[in-house]
Amino acid sequence: QRCCICRLWGASVTCRGRRCPRVFHFPCGSERGCVSQFFGEFKSFCWKHRPVQCVQAVQRDQTLCLICQEAVAGRPSYDTLVCPACASAWFHRRCIQGQALCSARHRFRCPLCQDVAAFQEEMFRLGIKIPDR
């Protein structure tokens, strides 16, 4: 099939949004803000149907990413994620993905509150790949 992003043939990732016709290459989807979940049914979603965070988190002044110490967006978004347990730990998607790949499942947790269960569940849902080892 033809990729809805780059228009080249060979796309195989289908959005699981209700009645969504979008099909894309995995790398194209990653660049455009699509989410692939690396657990269960391995669902993928386009930029319009991707899961969003419902965390009630309020920033004080300018909040920094706990990993790189650079500014994050003012609210949760595709590129800015928040720990669902403490709602005080903010991260860039690329930073927390790097942390997940280095830590693996048995060590991956919120760097601030140390929560494992809720944190991993939410990161999985938002498309963060957490390897087994």
Image: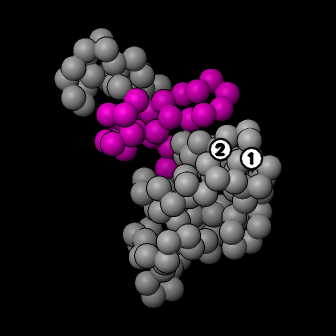
Question: Is 27 inside the magenta-drawn segment?
Answer: yes
Q: Is residue 63 above or below residue 115?
A: below
Identify residue for label 2: 130
Q: Which mark is residue 69?
A: none
**Image quarter hosting the C terminus:** top right
Direction top: furthest residue:
1
Q: Please name whichever residue, 88 or 20, is drawn nearer the observer in this view of the structure.
A: 88
The reply, left or right, for residue 132 in relation to residue 14 is right
Magenta range is: 26-52
Image location (x, y in percent) of residue 12: 40, 17
Do the CB atoms of the residues marked 1 and 2 lie less than 8 Å apart? yes
Q: Please name whichever residue, 18 or 81, is drawn nearer the observer in this view of the structure.
A: 81
Q: Is residue 29 above or below residue 111?
A: above
Q: Is residue 103 above or below residue 34?
A: below
Report the Cα–Cα distance between label 1 and label 2.
6 Å
Query: Within 10 Å of the Cα at label 1, are there few (<14), some (14-19), or many (20+) other Cα atoms?
Result: some
Q: Residue at x 61, y 71 (%)?
A: 89
Image location (x, y in percent) of residue 122: 64, 50
Image location (x, y in percent) of residue 120: 70, 50
Direction bottom: furthest residue:
61
Q: Residue at x 51, y 60 (%)?
A: 95
- Amino acid type for the residue under numbered disc 2: Ile
Identify residue for label 1: 105
